[in-house]
Amino acid sequence: DTEVTQTPKHLVMGMTNKKSLKCEQHMGHRAMYWYKQKAKKPPELMFVYSYEKLSINESVPSRFSPECPNSSLLNLHLHALQPEDSALYLCASTPEGSGSTDTQYFGPGTRLTVL
Amino acid sequence: AQKVTQAQTEISVVEKEDVTLDCVYETRDTTYYLFWYKQPPSGELVFLIRRNSFDEQNEISGRYSWNFQKSTSSFNFTITASQVVDSAVYFCALSATTSGTYKYIFGTGTRLKVLA
């Protein structure tokens, strides 16, 4: 199994809603990543979990809250988002922990629209 | 500072033409890795190649080939006999660990349109 899965594929939410994005990998990878990608832009790193611990937080607003319940699962909890948070949210994983230069394997993304 | 430049914002070619996507990078690290990813309209970033800074051998994989030249800090990607399915945004990326700080830098991407 060499894939990263993400659910849901699409999400529309209001500014007062609370929702969560889910990412899963069963490749035994030790690091997992959240990226945000706006239209016609490259992905921007948000968070990195290495060995289930948060190792990088790229000054992301607190309305985004990551969680890594176990080595295979990564969640991104969303609360009180703004319309400008609408974007494609990509999850990725690497075999080694963060700080390595491994290939990142990406999921298909969740396309989020905030109304 | 580390940087990846993809100067070509968008390229259009007719099917069966060859096309080269340029990537120029900047880094002070002596050990680093370069990557190419393909992002079709569906959104998923598909890994194409990873090359370390000590391996300047060019690589060919089917219709794809990569030319890594440290002297010009370039890692260009050529698609031979392009097909409509090659239409996508292609990202070049640089990865290095500088003083224990992890960096993974994407270029701005090149949108390739292959016309039938």
Image: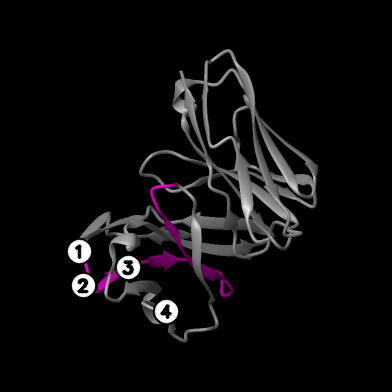
Circles 1 and 2 in contact, beta carbons < 8 Å: yes
What residue range appears in magenta?
A: B13-42
Residue with the mark numbered 4: B68
Q: Which residue is mark 2?
A: B17
Indicate the secondary structure of the residue bearing disc 1. strand
Q: Is residue B12 magenta?
A: no
Pointer 2 local density, CA inside 10 Å: few below 14, some 14–19, many at least 20: few
Q: Separation of disc 4 and disc 2 at Cα?
A: 22 Å
How many residues crowd mark 1 within 10 Å: few (<14), some (14–19), many (20+)? some
The type of residue carrying mark 2 is Glu
Q: Could you tell me which chain the residue with mark 2 belongs to?
A: B
| Distance between the alpha carbons at the discs numbered 1 and 4 | 23 Å
Residue sticking out furthest to the top: A16
Percent from the top left, x then y, of residue A17?
A: 60, 16
Q: Earlier in the sequence, mark 1 or mark 4?
A: 1
Residue drawn at (63%, 52%) of the image: A4
Residue drawn at (33%, 74%) of the image? B78
Q: Contact (CB < 8 A) between labels 1 and 4?
A: no
Work out whether disc 4 and disc 2 sit on a shared chain.
Answer: yes
Q: Earlier in the sequence, mark 4 or mark 3?
A: 3
* A98 and A113: which is toward the camera: A113
